[in-house]
Amino acid sequence: MAKKGKKFIFPDNVNSTYGAFLGLSLKELATYVLPISFFGVVLLAIPPYSLWLLGVKLIIILLLLTLAFALISAKPVKHRQNITMQDYLTHKKSYRFRQKRFYIKKRKPMD
């Protein structure tokens, strides 16, 4: 029989935000989706109003909205549903720029 090690049980991560639309909180919607929607309305209001140009404008707006929804709703850590892509990238950046220690001499072992 193989030696069985310790079994660690991690509870499900709890997210304190209320999922208003597609699991996104109202804050995320107001921060990311509302400015893009406002930009889209302004872009559609700018003349000229030819049919093909309106189609190009709509495609640009839909691509921006799709990209925003994809980045907001992406969960980079599979088993941690409360970690968002923005949090993940912030942690990676702070880890990369943290203070590092490099020892020049070999350290004496602690007693």
Image: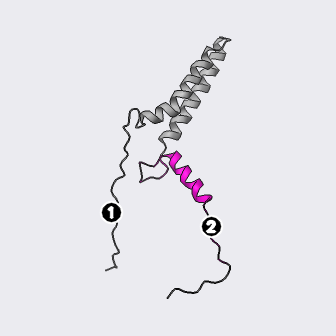
Q: Which residue is mark 2?
A: 100
Q: How many marks?
A: 2
Circle 2: is it few (<14), some (14-19), or many (20+) Cα within 10 Å?
few
Front in this rendered view, residue 95 or 65: 95
- Residue 106 placement (x, y as % from top left): 64, 84
- Residue 17 placement (x, y as % from top left): 38, 40
Q: Which residue is mark 1?
A: 9
Determine whether the residue tagged by mark 1 lies in a helix, strand or loop: loop
Front in this rendered view, residue 1 or 99: 99
Front in this rendered view, residue 79 or 13: 13
Q: Is residue 110 left or right of residue 103?
A: left
Give whichever of discs 2 and 1 has the lower sequence position.
1
Identified by mark 1, the residue type is: Ile
105 w.r.t. 81: above or below = below
Say which quadrant the N terminus sits in.
bottom left
Q: Residue 40 got which mark?
A: none
Q: Which residues are magenta?
A: 75-103
75 w.r.t. 8: above or below = above
